[in-house]
Each structure stands twice: as C-alpha cells, then as structure tokens.
C-alpha cells in the first residue's frame, strides 16, 4: 500500500477527509466545529428520547438550512451535529425538520418563518442556522424537530438550552435534550447536538 493510500485511509478513519459542511452551510462558523466534532461519535448510544410534537407543527416545510427570515430579530444560532444509530454509525440522507418560535416567542402558523427541513450529508451531518428562540407562556426555550432515517419511524422531539432558568419549571424539559458545546462565536451562539436513532 502506498504512503498516499495509507494517509488517505487514516484520514478517512478519522473522518477528516470529508469536505467541510461549511461549503453547504455558507458560513465559516461551521468549519472548526465540524472538523473538531467529526472524529467523535455521540456521548452515549442511548436513543434520543421522543417528546410531544406540540400544537404548532406545519407539514411541508421548505428545504433549507437557514430558517431565519431576512431581517428577523434575535441572536443568531448555528446548531450542528449528526444523526447516528445506537451503534454509532452515521445516517446519511436522514430528514431533519426543525420548527420553533421566533425571538419573541411567537410561532408562524400561517407561513413558514422559522420552519425548514434538510437532509444529512453522506456522513450524517446537518447544520441549522436560526436564532435563539424566545420564551412563550408555559414553556422554556426549545426547538422542535422531527428526525427520520429513510423509510423508518419518525423521531419527534425537542431541544433545550443550558442555563435557562425556566428549564426547571417546564414539565416537558429533559436534561438529555439540552444542546451540547454551547458557546459564543462573536455575537452569535453555536451548539451541537447528535440525534441517536434506534434502527434495530
Ligand atoms: Fe413549542
């Protein structure tokens, strides 16, 4: 085996020979995160818990990685991660459909503001550009999501944020669903979450 081939294989094993999703997401924010994150698999292999869909899901959301309408208020947030199986294998072409309240806590129930779906790449990666959702009566901050491997059952769940006082008083909140690696990137926020699907 040539030295070049060995190097290529090692890079593939480390997941480093992949084109950065930054090219797809159109933001430098993703590059460091994805390169740093790719070699790792999920923190554990428990399936991501399901949660209630809530009253505001709208089918047929647009295909897009940014769900922020032009000029919308709010702190920009990039959420990246992977869709994995319980054995740590990436799920390519999984559907990931997000919906959430805007920064003031309002859902768009007549259109598709802050709604959009995308498909994971060949390595199970997704990247969402949005804003940190606002609070609305009775709930802590959260993002709704449906995740589906092709032809399999849909996982419906919600994601949460660390350090939100209202988490404690929200009866739906689950600590396992708090986004990981929550951090500031300039004036923006970034976080990571890997979805684990039980495809057995
Ligand atoms: Fe909600």
Image (cartoon, rainbow, N blue to C red):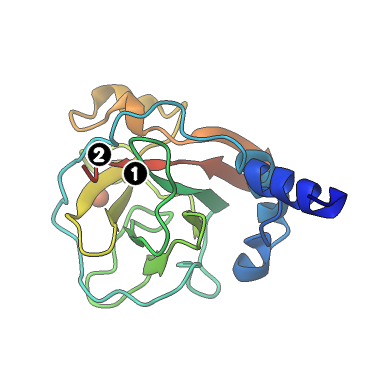
Of residues 27 and 89, the one drawn nearer to the viewer in this rendering:
89
* Residue 186 seen in render: no
- The answer as to whether callout 1 falls within 8 Å of ligand 1 is yes
Left/right placement of residue 174 relative to residue 123 reads left
Residue 32 located left or right of residue 198:
right
Q: Is mark 2 within 8 Å of ligand 1?
A: yes
Where residue 19 sits: x, y (%)? Answer: 68, 62
Identify the disc placed on residue 95: none
Task: Left or right? Give the position of 14 relative to 180.
Answer: right
Q: Secondary structure at mark 1?
A: loop
Q: Residue at x 33, y 36 (%)?
A: 86
The residue lying at 20 percent from left, 72 percent from top is: 59
The answer to whether residue 182 is seen in the rendering is yes
Q: Position of residue 68 (x, y in %)?
A: 48, 67
185 and 39: which one is in front? 39
Q: Position of residue 175 (x, y in %)?
A: 34, 25
Kind of element beneath mark 2: loop
CA gap between label 1 and label 2 equals 8 Å
Please state, as top left, top right, bottom left or bottom right, where the C terminus lies in the image: top left
The furthest residue to the right: 3
Circle 1/circle 2 CB separation < 8 Å = yes
Residue under the image location 29 percent in, 58 percent down: 149
Q: On screen, 147 above or below 191?
A: below
Q: Which residue is mark 2?
A: 139
Instruction: From the image, tell me which residue sits under label 1.
Output: 142
């Amino acid at each position: 085996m040539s030295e070049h081939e060995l190097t290529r294989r090692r890079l593939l094993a480390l997941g480093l020979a992949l084109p950065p999703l930054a090219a797809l997401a159109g933001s430098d924010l993703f590059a460091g995160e994805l390169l740093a994150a790719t070699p790792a698999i999920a923190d554990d292999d428990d399936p991501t818990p399901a949660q209630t869909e809530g009253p505001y899901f709208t089918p047929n959301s647009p295909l897009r990685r940014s769900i922020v309408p032009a000029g919308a208020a709010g702190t920009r947030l990039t959420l990246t991660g992977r869709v994995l199986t319980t054995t740590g294998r990436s799920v390519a072409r999984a559907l990931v459909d997000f919906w959430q309240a805007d920064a003031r806590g309002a859902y768009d129930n007549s259109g598709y503001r802050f709604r959009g779906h995308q498909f994971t790449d060949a390595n199970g990666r997704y990247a969402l550009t949005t804003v940190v959702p606002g609070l609305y009566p009775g709930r802590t901050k959260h993002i709704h999501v449906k995740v589906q491997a092709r032809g399999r059952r849909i996982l419906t769940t919600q994601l949460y944020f660390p350090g939100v006082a209202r988490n404690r008083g929200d009866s739906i909140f689950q600590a396992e669903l708090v986004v990981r690696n929550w951090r500031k990137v300039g004036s923006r926020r970034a976080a990571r979450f890997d979805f684990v699907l039980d495809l057995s």
